[in-house]
Image (tube, helix red, strand yellow):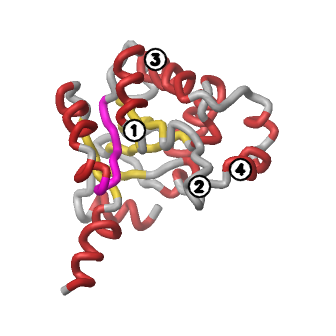
Amino acid sequence: PAATRTAVVEYGVRLLDTDAASRNEQLIFTSGDVTVVTKVWYTRVGFNRTRLSDVDSLRALGGESIVVGLIHWPRCRSEIEWMRCEEEEVELGERVRNLPGGDWRGCWRALEDLYEEGLLEGIGGSNFEKSDLLELVGTNGITPHLIQLNLWTFLFDPDLVRLCQTRSIHIQLYNVMNGGVIPLLDRL
């Protein structure tokens, strides 16, 4: 955790973003004034898979930080070239594969439970489309605290942004440098 320790201690970074799929949570330096956002990968959606995934994540993170748990993707999408839906399911360890999965709604219920138990300080989603987010805020007890959006979704889906604003869902953008700034610099 040397790089994140330097970021936190020397540069005052207070938000670190990671996810279980990257297998790097154990490298995150944590302290009580740092918020760590971690995410449940699409192979781990479903109530029991999410409980297991988040308990594993909390253990890897050391439990000292404020942890926000997100659903990374509500589902695997075969039309996205890099998603390996069937292969990743087969590659799951038996401990996870034997649990029912595939339902982001069950994943959300597990996140709500972990939040209510005080194990997570906030919950939310990433890569949700407007229809998924509408269903999420319309049928569940806890409104998401945070949603991560790709820069391009933020710029070109004003209805989704408005929905977040009206429901007081904090928006965190990703892909800002790679998807926005660097292509603009390349044009100069």
To which residue does mark 3 refer? 117
- Give the x, y percent position of residue 114: 48, 22
Element type at marker 3?
Answer: loop
- The amino acid type of the residue labelled 1 equals Glu
Circle 4 sits on which residue? 88
Secondary-structure class at tag 1: loop
Secondary structure predominantly adopted by residues drawn in magenta: strand
Decide: marks 2, 3 in contact (CB < 8 A)?
A: no
- Determine contact: label 2, label 1, CB under 8 Å: no
Which residue position holds label 1? 129
Say which quarter of the image contains residue 169: top left
On the image, numbered disc 2 is attached to which residue?
23
Residue 112 part of the magenta-drawn span: no
Residue 95 at x, y = what percent?
77, 36
Give how far apart the Cα atoms at labels 2 and 4 are. Answer: 14 Å
Element assignment for label 2: loop
Residue 94 falls in which quadrant of the image?
top right
The quarter of the image holding the C terminus is bottom left
Residue at image point 31% right, 46% down: 34
Magenta extent? 145-152
Q: Earlier in the sequence, mark 2 or mark 1?
A: 2
Q: Nearer the viewer, mark 4 or mark 1?
A: 1
Label 3, label 4: how many angstroms apart (C-alpha)?
30 Å
Gap in Å between the C-alphas at discs 4 and 1?
Answer: 23 Å
Mark with earlier residue (3, 4) = 4
Q: Residues within 10 Å of mark 4 (few under 14, many from 20)?
A: few
Residue at (41%, 67%) from the top-left corner?
3
Task: Tell which of 140 and 35 is nearer to you.
Answer: 140
